[in-house]
Amino acid sequence: MSDKPRILYSSDGSHEKQCKTCGHYPCECKVVDINPSALTLKIRRETSGRGGKAVTVVFEFPSNPDYFKNLTTKLKTQCGTGGTFKETSIEIQGDHRDKIKAILEKMGFKVKLAGG
């Protein structure tokens, strides 16, 4: 554990920079090597809080930001749409669950569709 105190409350927005997993900024999580055949990623469609627009979310992956930022770029390119990488998920604009599932399976990941 580091000597830095964890932020419990902040009105200046600095609490939003904390890692969702370890609670520190900068993140002190251990970066995990990625073996696609050993991982099961989940995909769901969300519309909540987005003005009724659909977003495809890939979630439940280990901590390796560089790998998943690159994966986000590949998925956005393949789907021909925008999106973003967050610490705990990848969000791709639009309902592309089947297309993303096929892309990830081709890369060697196990994929499950979550939600209804």
Image (spheres, rainbow, N blue to C red):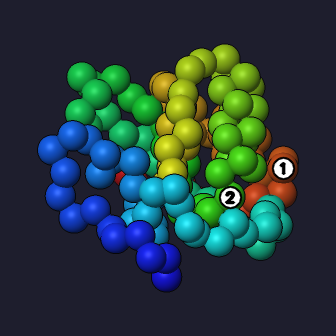
| Frontmost residue, 68 versus 78 | 68
Q: Residue at x 43, y 64 (%)?
A: 24
Q: Which residue is mark 1?
A: 107
Judge from the rendering whether residue 19 lies leftward or rightward of residue 68; answer left or right: left
- Label 1: state its secondary structure: loop
Residue at position x 72%, y 23% in the image: 77
Choose between 96 and 61: the one closer to the eye.
61
Residue that numbered label 2 is attached to = 64
Instruction: Residue 54: give x, y in percent of width and height.
Output: 39, 29
Q: Whole-percent x and y of residue 70?
A: 74, 39
Name above or below for residue 82 compared with residue 107: above
Estimate how packed mark 2 is, as few (under 14), some (14 to 19) or many (20 or more) residues with alpha carbons within 10 Å. Answer: some
Q: Where on the picture, by quarter, is residue 90?
A: top right
Kind of residue indicated by mark 2: Asn
Q: Amino acid at mark 1?
A: Met
Q: Is residue 50 left or right of residue 84?
A: left
Q: x, y (%) of residue 19?
A: 44, 58
Q: Nearer the viewer, mark 1 or mark 2?
A: 2
Residue at image location 83% in from the left, 57% down from the top: 108
User: Going from the N terminus, do you reach mark 1 or mark 2 first?
Assistant: 2
